[in-house]
Image: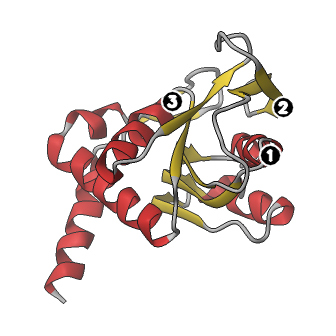
């Protein structure tokens, strides 16, 4: 019971560290800013430990972080677990041969890329991003890992914007992928 109480206290503390910035990056958007959470050592360590524990439960063999804020958590989780980190970048940012997928999101139509040798065929990959919004970036990252022959062990995020129904969108395309978000915003 004490562990659940402490976990709930920490989740509440983390939630309080995420302010909403109105009309960023464009009018009508309420941007959830995770930088204060990352700046707070106790919150950052808690989030990394929670994501790492879940990645371990999923049997991950490598962590994948999505540009750019997914790198913050993905790298820390990979280090915590003693694993490598494969990166998902926007098109044109990686220097060697890549595989590319269309990655539309709330703001623009983009492309995601990974190096062709980032994931070994059959490797269990846990994908990490800062948040799940509409699910489009998540879906694109899952597609990219699968194109490289990886098995998606799960998709984890710090925040879920539940009102945008991203989890439902991901499950409609990839119903078998386990999803985890630590903090949920219903509005």
Marks 3 and 2, the one that precedes in the sequence = 3
Which residue appears at 19% of the width and 39% of the height?
40
- Residue at the disc numbered 1: 143
Assign a secondary structure to mark 2.
strand
Q: What is the C-alpha distance between the residues marked 1 and 2?
A: 7 Å
39, 165: nearer the viewer: 39
Marks 3 and 1, the one that precedes in the sequence = 3
Q: Position of residue 144 (x, y in %)?
A: 77, 40
- 12, above or below 19, in the image: below
| Whether label 1 touches label 2, CB < 8 Å | yes
- Using the image, tell me which numbered label, if any, was put on residue 101: 2
> For this view, does 187 lie left or right of residue 141?
left
> For this view, does 50 lie left or right of residue 63?
left
> For this view, does 151 lie left or right of residue 32?
right
Q: What is the C-alpha distance between the residues marked 3 and 1?
A: 31 Å
> For this view, does 3 lie left or right of residue 170?
left
- Residue 33 can be seen in this image: yes
Q: What is the C-alpha distance between the residues marked 3 and 2?
A: 30 Å
Assign a secondary structure to mark 1.
helix
Mark 3 neighbour class, 10 Å CA radius: few under 14, some 14 to 19, many 20 or more: few
- Residue at the disc numbered 3: 22
Mark 2 neighbour class, 10 Å CA radius: few under 14, some 14 to 19, many 20 or more: some
Of badges 3 and 2, the one in the foreground is 2
Assign a secondary structure to mark 3.
strand
166, 41: nearer the viewer: 41
Q: Which quadrant would the N terminus be assigned to in this image?
A: bottom left
Q: Position of residue 178 (x, y in %)?
A: 63, 68
Q: Position of residue 103 (x, y in %)?
A: 79, 32
Q: Quadrant of residue 49?
A: bottom left
Which residue appears at 25% of the width and 55% of the height?
46
Q: Quadrant of residue 187?
A: bottom right
């Amino acid at each position: 019971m004490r562990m659940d109480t402490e976990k709930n206290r920490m989740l509440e503390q983390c939630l309080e560290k995420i302010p909403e910035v109105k009309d960023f990056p464009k009018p009508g958007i309420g941007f959830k800013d995770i930088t204060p959470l990352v700046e707070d050592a106790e919150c950052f360590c808690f989030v990394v430990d929670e994501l790492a524990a879940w990645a371990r439960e999923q049997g991950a063999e490598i962590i994948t972080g999505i540009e750019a804020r997914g790198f913050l958590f993905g790298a820390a989780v990979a280090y915590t677990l003693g694993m490598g980190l494969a990166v998902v970048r926007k098109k044109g940012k990686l220097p060697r041969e890549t595989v590319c997928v269309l990655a539309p999101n709330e703001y623009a139509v983009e492309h995601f890329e990974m190096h062709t040798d980032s994931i070994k065929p059959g490797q269990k990959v846990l994908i990490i991003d800062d948040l799940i919004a509409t699910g489009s970036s998540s879906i694109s990252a899952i597609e990219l890992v699968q194109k490289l022959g990886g098995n998606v062990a799960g998709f984890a995020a710090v925040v879920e914007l539940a009102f945008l129904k991203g989890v439902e969108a991901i499950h409609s395309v990839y119903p078998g992928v386990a999803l985890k978000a630590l903090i949920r915003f219903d509005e």
